[in-house]
Image: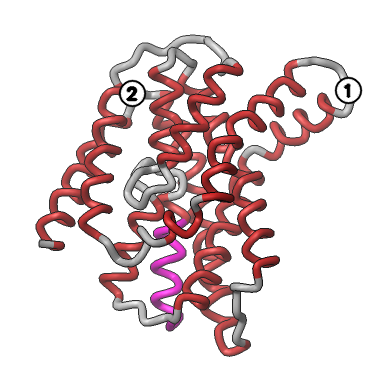
Amino acid sequence: MDILDAIILGIIQGLTEFLPVSSSGHLELGKAILGDQSVPEESLLFTVVLHFATALSTMVVFRKDIVSIVKGALKFEWNEDLQFISKIAISMIPAVIVGLFFEEQLESLFGGNIFLVGCMLIITAILLFLADRAKNTGKNVSFENAFIIGVSQTIAMLPGISRSGATISTSVLLGNDKTKAARFSFLMVVPLIFGKIVKDILSGELTYNSGNFTPLFIGFVAAFIAGLFACTWMIALVKKSKLSYFAIYCTIVGVITIIYSV
């Protein structure tokens, strides 16, 4: 993988991890368009590096929230902060189950099946369209909501389903405040990303070639910077009910992808 491809894919990951247009789907499309010839292990390492970059950008954007939550939780009282962490833990249950027991079946879908990506992008568009028309409230995410949002996040493991789009839309459709829905959506994925990175490292499936350091580093930086921008922008868009623009985008890209695949 050359440096230009690394920059392009890094920007795609950084933007689409937060914007509701499916990072996994766009990475598959990007690799197909750029003709990525990386062996599976090298491609997996690059994907892990990009996800690590976007996880760090999330932590930077929500650094004050994270510090406040940790401080509150360390009081060891059943306060709002400890409850929030508990909700995050509950939301992770469906994804952890699928990741542990159905990982091979899931990974088999990431083999350049762009027809599937196109279909899932259209489903993402429908979710965004519905969520954009929901009324804003001041309601917090409940424990029951957290589990349902977690199920939505698990479904979003499919290439073409936007994780942020699916989780934010689900949360909003459940009647939760839009800004709080976005905050919960972005923070709930951080422990999952780090958990997946640790799992991949321990599995021994990641192979590193010193000759790949430059594209890996450039891709990391591109994804991190793009992630900072996209995360901040997405919070404002959700609050202002501007998701329909992304619904139109996902529909157009989905249709083009389906036509291209056949």
**Left or right: where 234 falls relative to 71:** left
Identity of the residue drawn at 34% across and 63% down: 28
User: Where, quadrant-wise, is the N terminus in this rendering?
Assistant: bottom left
Q: Residue furthest bottom?
A: 211
Tell me which amino acid carries mark 1.
Phe
- Report if residue 40 lies within the magenta region: no
Q: Earlier in the sequence, mark 1 or mark 2?
A: 1
Q: State the image coordinates of residue 199 (x, y, percent, origin top left).
A: 66, 59
Vertical side of 241 occupied by 96: above or below: below
Q: Residue beneath label 1, please?
A: 76
Q: State the image coordinates of residue 161 (x, y, percent, origin top left).
A: 35, 44
Q: Which mark is residue 131?
A: 2
Q: State the image coordinates of residue 187 (x, y, percent, origin top left).
A: 60, 37
The quadrant where residue 220 appears: bottom right
- Report if residue 9 lies within the magenta region: yes
Pointer 1 and pointer 2: residues touching (CB < 8 Å)? Answer: no
Q: Which mark is residue 7?
A: none
**Left or right: where 61 falls relative to 120:** right
Q: Of residues 43 and 253, which is closer to you in this image?
A: 43
Identity of the residue drawn at 61% across and 81% down: 208
Tell me which amino acid carries mark 2.
Ala
Vertical side of 88 occupied by 51: above or below: below
Q: Of residues 88 and 185, which is closer to you in this image?
A: 88
Assess disc 2: are there few (<14), some (14-19) or many (≥20) residues with their C-alpha within 10 Å of its C-alpha.
many
Identity of the residue drawn at 26% across and 45% down: 121
- Which-is-in-front pick, marks 1 and 2? 1
Vertical side of 53 occupied by 243: above or below: above
Q: State the image coordinates of residue 226 (x, y, percent, origin top left).
A: 48, 55
Which secondary structure lies at badge 1? Answer: loop
Identity of the residue drawn at 38% across and 48% down: 158
Q: Which residues are magenta?
A: 1-13
User: Where, quadrant-wise, is the C terminus in this rendering?
Assistant: bottom left
